[in-house]
Each structure stands twice: as structure tokens, then as C-alpha cells.
Amino acid sequence: MHMWRLLIILYTLAFNSLWAELQWIQPPAVTDKGYRVPQPDYQPNLPKDLGAHPDYAIEWWYWVGHLEAIDSNETFGFQSTVFRLAGDPQQSDASDDAHLGRSQLYMSHLALSDIAQQRYIHAERIVRNGWQANAAEQGLQISAGPITAHWNEPAQAIEMQLNYPDDTRLTLTMSSRKPMLIFGERGLSRKGADPAAVSWYWTYSRLDVIGTLTRGDTSIALKGTAWMDHEISSSQLGGDLEGWDWTAIQLDNGTELKAYRLRRPNGGSDPWSAVYWIDALGQHHSVYAAAFEWKTVSTWTSPHTGLRYPTEVKILATNPTSKKLETYHLRPKLDDQEFTGNDSSNAYWEGACDVFDAQGKRIGQAYLELAGYGDGLGGKLN
């Protein structure tokens, strides 16, 4: 009996300590440099807010997905990200060449994992706004080097084209099966204790995809599922964090899971690390760092950079709806899915995985992102 009382006391103290760290902090209106900071309780206006928000320091549009050939056994994973990085908010384009702005910089990342051939191709392109790149403010209309994406209003779908460096092209049409999700407390996703380290984090967790993969004169018809994030912020991470491990899981039963841990230098997880369960109707429930474990099963060492990544992991968390402890075991479909881009110091691992339960049964697919294992993560942007 005394032991149970002691455990209850210790649990209460731990909960109170966690709650103290997770108490609401009002973000400032602007950063020290003058970038706007996302504010609470904002409801996105769709489809307008799928477009750009240039008053904020950083914004990205992110798609990952799992594709299968309609007429063969070939399978693929794809990643596509467009980052918008704002220049000095006091700087205007008025004195620039009319066709080349300097107020916004765009960075395009695109990758393709060919599972059958165990081959990974990827590319990074950095372009300035103007004739090199553009993102409309009134809706999704992006052209940034090898990536184009736009919202097709009549079809209620996203159309995208990815042009890889080896004469490979991927064209996709993506239609959401569920409504957009708004993550975080009062609509703000926190990235650490810094009040300005917040974002608007909006997600389509299950997109039905049809498309075509073209290699030279050969075309492969595809179908599959994808995940889209649109995130707007003026700071990447709190200053006390060194990186993150993140995953988007699509389960075969029609539900999804998003999980991430914000890593502290001592190897621990920031209290704002979280797991979100998304049900068949698009409703979501979450737990924070104290209520789940992110465990490394095995690591992979890159022959390109020498970095070691925890690419096989288990996430153990108690689902707040079912009250059951669940296990999600992520295993890469391809070991070498390291994105090195133009500068290998900014390398990260991002790849397609299979997902298994505690009994070893395959239950879905995932994309896993492992960032900050080298020295290339930029600091805060504010």
C-alpha cells in the first residue's frame, strides 16, 4: 500500500512538473527582426491560406507519399518540399530588377525512392523570387525550380510536377479524403520553450493520388496515398534544441498517426514533443512527451557523410481513445534515403518505411524524418 501511495505521489509530482513546462505562453506579435509571429485561435481560410504568407520568416509546403505501379509490382516513395525564406522584413523589392526579387528565397527539395531497384535519387535547388520562383498569396500556386504545384479548383485537387535531375519526371494529382487538420494548442504548434518558437501547422493526412512516372520514353501509371503539411513560422526551433525525429504514419485501417520528438542536447525530449492519432473521420487526439517512448531499434551509417541515423525505431504510446498501449515499429524500405542536397553539412535522413505492430504484423506505411544529426541545422530566424 505504501508503495502505491509513493508511486501516486511521484506520478503527481511528475505531472505537475510537466504541466508547469507546458503552460500556455502567449507568443509575441513580431520577432526582434520584425517578422510576424503566428497567433493563437486562427482559422485558415481555404483555399486561400494554402498560398504564401510572406510576412512570416519561414514557410514550407511538404508532401510525402507511397506509390505503386498499376500494371506491375513496382513501388515508390516520394518527398517534395518547397521552403520559403523571407529576407529582411525592412527590405523591399522596389529597387530590384523587375524580374528578380530579393525579399523571398525559395529552396526546393525533391526525392524519389525506387523500392524495387533499391535506388534513391534526390535534388536541391535554391532560387529567388521573381522569374526564378513564385508562390501566390491568394491560393496554392507554386513554381520553384524543379517543383510546381497548384490547386485545381474545379477538381478540388492538388496538381504537382517534380522534375528530377536524371530525366525522371513525376506528375501527381492529389485529392484529400479528410478535412484539413489544425495541430497544436489553440492552433499553435510549439517548437520549444521560446514564446516565438511556434507555427501554424496545417495537414492533409490522407490524400488519394493518381499519377505518372516518366523516365525518358517510358511511362508508369501510378496510384497511392500521400500526406501534406503546410507550416508557417518565424522560428525553426527553440534555442535549447538540436534537432527532431518526426514521422507521418498511414495505417491500413484508414487512420493516421503523427509523432515527433524535439531533441535536447542531452538526448532527452522536449516536453512539447507529441503523438497525434487521427481517426477515420479526421478527428485527432494527442499526448505529449511524458506519455510516449521513442526507442531506437537500429541505426544506419551513411557512406556519404559518415552520419549515423536511428532509422529503425519503435514508438510506444497509450492511445487516449482506446486507453491501450500501442506499438508502431518503423522499418525502412530502403536504407540509403539520406538527403544531402547541395551542401552535405545540412544532410538529413527522410525515407519510406513499413510499419509493424508489437506482434510483427505489418499495419501500414510511414515517412520518417531525422534532422540535426550533423552540424547543418540553422538556428532561430528571429
Image (cartoon, rainbow, N blue to C red):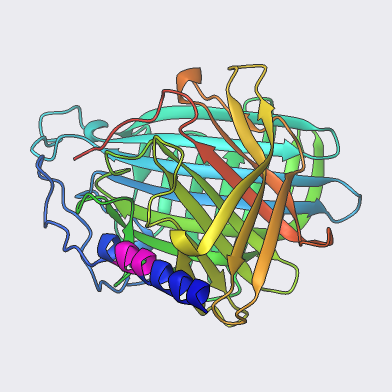
**For the magenta stretch, what is the residue range?**
13-19
Using the rendered image of the protein, determine whether residue 183 is visible from the camera's viewpoint: no
Picture residue at 13% right of the left edge, 40% below the top: 89
Q: Residue furthest right?
A: 72
Q: Is residue 74 above or below residue 127?
A: below
Q: Is residue 280 above or below residue 32?
A: below
Picture residue at 41% right of the left edge, 28% below the top: 126
In the rendered image, residue 94, in percent from the top left (x then y), is placed at: 11, 35
Picture residue at 41% right of the left edge, 36% below the top: 266
Image quadrant in which you'd find residue 14: bottom left
Q: Quick one: 218 or 349, which is closer to the camera?
A: 349
Which quadrant: the C terminus?
Answer: top left
Number of callouts in the render? 0
In the displayed structure, does residue 223 sit left or right of residue 304?
Answer: right
Picture residue at 68% right of the left edge, 59% below the top: 328
Using the rendered image of the protein, determine whether residue 214 is visible from the camera's viewpoint: yes
Q: Quick one: 290 or 360, which is closer to the camera?
A: 290
Q: Quick one: 279 or 212, which is closer to the camera?
A: 279
Whether residue 70 is in magenta: the answer is no
Give the main secondary structure of the magenta stretch: helix
Q: Is residue 307 above or below residue 352?
A: above
In the rendered image, residue 211, in percent from the top left (x then y), is placed at: 70, 54
In the rendered image, residue 99, in percent from the top left (x then y), is placed at: 27, 31
Q: Is residue 224 above or below residue 283?
A: above
In the displayed structure, does residue 188 sit left or right of residue 60?
Answer: left
In the rendered image, residue 163, in percent from the top left (x then y), is placed at: 60, 35
Image quadrant in which you'd find residue 8: bottom left
